[in-house]
């Protein structure tokens, strides 16, 4: 116990609030899923170690065709985000999802521009996975 003569500086609530937190709540309006997986194509400058990770969204993309694997990975990733984004009452928050599977630079720009236009000043989640 500190003696009564010890005085500590008074703390107010504003000094305890972290500066990185937003002052106003923002809603996440949409999710951009950019997947540049290049399934079946290894990078030219890297030798793949053995063993190595192969699973994408808990499935092996080498077991089905490249096009089907891309679609299925995109669907499964979207389903995972939808599950995480449910509100406490079990309902969906109505997020807009946009997928770009093995996109060109122009396709990524178009997805980002359209999602930004949709979200206005609210927040977007941008998921990129590329190899």
Image: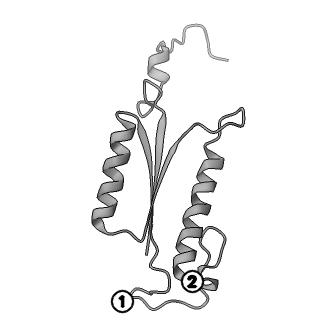
Report how far apart the C-alphas of labels 1 and 2 lie in the structure. 25 Å
Q: Give the residue pinned by disc 1.
A: 45
Q: Residue furthest right?
A: 89
Residue 38, by quadrant, is bottom left
Q: Closer to the camera, 94 or 28?
A: 94
From the viewer's side, name the closer residue of 69 and 121: 69
The x, y position of residue 112, in whole percent, is 34, 52
Q: State the residue position of label 2.
A: 65
The residue that appears at 49% across and 86% down in the rendered structure is 40
Task: From the top left corner, tell me how far across and down residue 14 is, in percent.
Answer: 45, 18
* Structure colour scheme: one colour
Of tags 1 and 2, the one toward the viewer is 2
**Residue sitting nearer the eye, 36 or 53:** 36
Image coords of residue 102 (percent x, y): 41, 71
Name the side, left or right, on which 91 lies relative to 49: right
**Percent position (x, y) of residue 113?**
30, 49
């Amino acid at each position: 116990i500190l003696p009564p003569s010890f005085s500590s500086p008074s703390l107010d609530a504003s000094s305890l609030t972290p500066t990185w937190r937003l002052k106003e709540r923002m809603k996440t309006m949409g999710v951009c899923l950019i997947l540049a997986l290049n399934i079946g194509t290894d990078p030219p400058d890297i030798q793949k170690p053995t063993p190595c990770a192969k699973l994408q969204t808990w499935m092996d993309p080498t077991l089905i065709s490249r096009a089907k694997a891309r679609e299925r990975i995109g669907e499964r990733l979207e389903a995972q985000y939808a599950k995480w984004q449910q509100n406490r009452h079990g309902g969906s928050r109505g997020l807009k999802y946009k997928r770009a599977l093995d996109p060109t630079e122009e396709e990524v720009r178009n997805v980002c521009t359209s999602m930004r236009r949709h979200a206005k000043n609210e927040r977007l989640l941008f998921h990129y996975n590329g190899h």
